[in-house]
Amino acid sequence: MTSNRHKPASAEQGRPSGFSRLRSRLRLLYHSQSRKAQRFQFSVLVVDLAIIVFFIASPLLRENETFLWIDYSIALLLAADLIARALAASDVGRWARQVPVILDIFILITLLAPTLFFNLGFLRILRLWTLTRSSTFWRPLKRRGFAVYRETIQAVINLLVFLFVVTGFVYTAFANRGAEGIVGYVDALYFTVATVTTTGFGDVTLPGTWGKLASIAIMIVGISLFVKLAQSIFRPNKVHFPCPQCGLQNHDPDAVHCKACGQILNIPDPGNY
């Protein structure tokens, strides 16, 4: 009789807790390939892209009465996403030390204290860069056959992030502070694009030594990103498929052997990869 009394207790001990079930469910939603998970991941991606559009338009919307309400609402969404991704991670400590996660936490702080971090608000666009470092961004694209364009898409996104981060910096640091021609956000964007492309019309310039140094840095980094983008567009498309023997990451879509070590490859069809 004693053993029978203890059987239900043992069964209860072996049953996962509600917290464990929540983590398992989140892990499946964020990382599995089921149809339900795919719909969830696509919904998260759409919301993230909408948030990024808001970040880009923020300098033009700051005077709107509803700006703070939208700002705090996005902070709640981002906080919920961070908590959910932390629960879905198998090693929370390792997950929290990743650079994209650290940047997302910083972006969340700027959203929670928009007045205090007003001058650093332009860094929120880095959310687009951190988004492309997650599997949630690439899985829907892979399912639609865009895997072969991953390098090109990444190069375009890197350039866009750089342009808008620099535009925000120029607008925050130099608008109405002696910079010739920079009065609004569009002026800052115009200067950034003209500088990155080395067009150099000269109608908009940054004042002083620091302005010249900032212009030099913008040109050097911008040209590097343009070259990277041009390479990804004009050279033959590659697929991201690590070689099991030597680890070479990129191969031709129809490659049978690894060019580095000769290992036989089994690259999935681009439509399913």
Image: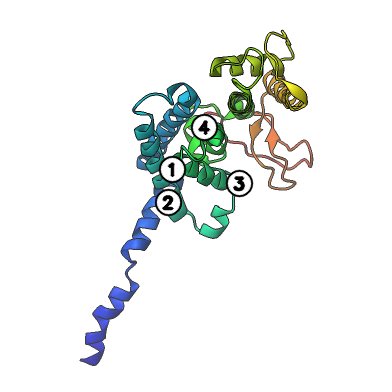
Which residue sits at x=57%, y=39%?
133
Whether residue 91 is visible to the viewer of this picture, yes or no, is no
Viewer-nearest of labels 4 and 3? 3
Is 135 placed above or below 255 here?
below
- Is the Cβ of the residue at disc 1 closer than 8 Å to that at disc 4? no
List the residue tagged with mark 1: 112
**Disc 3 marks which residue?**
99
Label 2, secondary structure: give it: helix
Give me the residue at 57% from left, 57% from top: 94
Give coordinates of residue 245: x percent, y percent. Answer: 73, 48
Calculate the distance from the C-alpha at mark 3 to the C-alpha at mark 1: 20 Å
Query: Measured from the top left, where is residue 107 in percent x and y?
Result: 51, 41
* SS assignment at label 3: helix
Rendered image: mark on residue 142: 4
- For marks 4 and 3, the one nearer the N-term is 3
Amino acid type indicated by mark 1: Leu
According to the image, label 2 marks what residue? 83
| Label 3, label 2: how far apart the Cα atoms are | 16 Å
- Spatial distance from mark 1 to mark 2, Cα to Cα? 15 Å
Disc 3 vs disc 1: which is toward the camera? Answer: 1
Indicate which label's residue lies in the foreground, 1 or 4: 1
